[in-house]
């Protein structure tokens, strides 16, 4: 399945839905900080996310209970691959070097990560 890119607003809605695992529109709305989006705005976002095959829903009377079809891990993996491809010519080495250079990741963190990966087998 090809995972599409989300807008910031769609991604925010997905973050809340991943957190809830399942939820009605009102449940999602409660997680938003003030000023909260209008109900119609969030409803439209969920409709778009359904069209993009990110969410589906079960019908309970007149209400829909939404649940994710794409996991956070699937989306973050796709996003990371796209980010590395767009900004670092597909090189994860260059991406990690950039993070260390910009003090976003310490050398100690990198060494710890390498040790975890080596011991993963």
Image: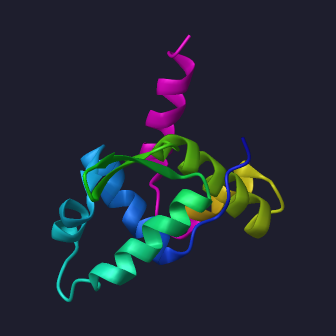
Q: Position of residue 94 (x, y in %)?
A: 73, 57
Out of 66 and 21, give the one closest to the viewer.
Answer: 66
The residue lying furthest to the bottom in this view is 35
Q: Is residue 58 left or right of residue 70?
A: left
Above or below, 46 relative to 35: above
Q: In this view, does 113 lie to the left or right of 27?
A: right
Residue 58 appears in the picture as rendered: yes
The residue lying furthest to the top in this view is 121
Above or below, 42 relative to 54: below
Q: Is residue 115 located in the magenta-colored stretch of the structure?
A: yes
Q: How is the image coloured?
A: rainbow
Tell me the residue at 58%/67% (across/down). Answer: 6
Q: Is residue 106 left or right of residue 39?
A: right
Q: Position of residue 12 (x, y in %)?
A: 39, 68
In this picture, which residue range is highlighted in magenta? 100-121
Instruction: Specify the quadrant that holds the C terminus.
Output: top right
Tell me the residue at 67%/51% (across/down). Answer: 3
Above or below, 20 relative to 63: above
Residue 100 appears in the picture as rendered: no
Splitting the image into 4 quarters, where does residue 95 fall? bottom right
Q: Is residue 102 located in the magenta-colored stretch of the structure?
A: yes
Q: How many numbered callouts?
A: 0
């Amino acid at each position: 399945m090809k995972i599409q890119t989300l807008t910031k607003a769609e991604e925010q809605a997905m973050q809340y839905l991943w957190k809830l695992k399942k939820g009605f529109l009102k449940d999602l709305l409660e997680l938003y900080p003030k000023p909260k989006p209008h109900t119609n705005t969030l409803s439209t976002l969920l409709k778009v996310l359904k069209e993009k095959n990110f969410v589906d829903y079960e019908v309970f009377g007149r209400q829909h209970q939404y649940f994710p079809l794409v996991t956070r891990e699937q989306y973050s993996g796709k996003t990371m691959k796209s980010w590395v491809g767009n900004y670092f010519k597909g090189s994860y080495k260059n991406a990690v070097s950039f993070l260390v250079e910009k003090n976003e990741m310490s050398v100690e963190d990198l060494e710890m990560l390498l040790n975890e990966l080596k011991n993963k087998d």
